[in-house]
Amino acid sequence: MYVKPSVGSHIKRLLALLLVLAASRAAAHPLAPALLELRELGGGRVGVTWKTSRYSAPGVAMAPILPAACRAESAPTATVEADSVTQTWTVLCDPGGLVGARVGVSGLGEARVDALIRVTMADGRLIRAIVRAASPLLTIPVRPQPLDVVRAYVAIGIEHILTGVDHLLFIAGLVLLVGAGMPLLRVLTAFIVGHSITLSLAGLDLLRVPSRPTELLIAVSVFWLAVELAREPAERPAWLRNRPWVMALALGLLHGFGFASALREVGLPQGEAALALCSFNVGIELGQLAFVALLLIAAAALRAVRVTWPRWAQLIPLYTMGSLAAFWCLERAAALIE
């Protein structure tokens, strides 16, 4: 007899695909974006900082693009860290300053990464932007426009959540825990409220938590959720069955610190910090909602496929999720003692 599969069983199949993609990246170090930082020192002198990942793809040569009028005043000094290489030097540019100059990064397409550009002007203004392979150059404006800030930071938020496999697995776990409908809406709202609170506090430097312990605890949260999902619903704690939104709110507070760590790498523009923070958070929410919508739409489409999966096959994605989270726990714990 045919038994109609539940939404949860379809989402488990989709989760299995996500886990395969995640596992393919688990053993490799993530390719972090490059960073080009310029600081006006006065008299036409500009300090340059160029930071790249040590784990760039073989044969890829990224390089900073500086204004044509700038010439090196000192040789680069390199500092090698666990996962990055930072070079610093000084260039002599037009005494009129960097306003109107074009800067950027070459080789982004081959490296398949983006680059952060951070410019500190002589008057204290801070300009931040992201350049990509399709648009590798930035024209330094007199003052960043609010709409430019909104566009840039919404895009950063969307990109961060959609490339954060640990966050995506946790969200998929919430969908598996409560299913669709009003329970899912309550749980997602609680998660959004939780991470919005800590993202705002940490993003504005009102509360600062070290990033490495935070990333470890996020991995622990994914592992714990995988363990609970592998149990029969009746075996889960009563508070988790009856009030899953409480767990989503509490762990949302934790994940918010992780989002804030990513935002800290980019920084907030001077004078537009609140707008940039709000835009980044909107990007996070849009990315999360798009991911959940994709899961639900694809699960609805799969319900038309008349296939019944045995219980052990449905557990494979959950055990894989737990194994991957355990790997992250060990990897991030090791990073704490390096």
Image (spheres, helix red, strand yellow):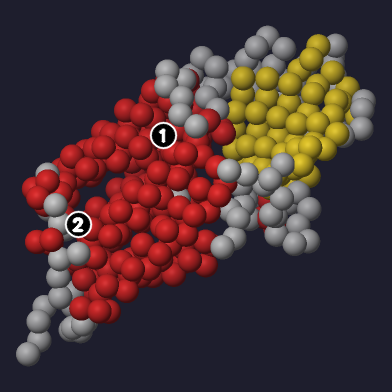
Q: CA distance from mark 1 to mark 2?
A: 23 Å
Q: Residue at x 46, y 29 (%)?
A: 209
Residue 257's disc is: 1
Dot 1 or dot 2: first in sequence order is: 2
Left or right relative to 117: residue 88: right
Left or right relative to 54: residue 7: left
Q: Position of residue 158 (x, y in %)?
A: 43, 44
Q: Could one spot residue 103 in this view of the protein?
A: no
Q: Position of residue 144 (x, y in %)?
A: 56, 22
Q: Nearer the viewer, residue 180 or 140?
A: 180
Q: Is residue 132 above or below residue 225?
A: above
Identify the image quadrant of the C terminus: top right
Q: Toward which corner of the image does residue 277 lie, by quadrant?
A: top left
- Disc 2: CA contacts within 10 A as few (<14), some (14-19) or many (>=20): many
Q: Position of residue 89 (x, y in %)?
A: 84, 29
Q: Residue at x 41, y 50 (%)?
A: 219
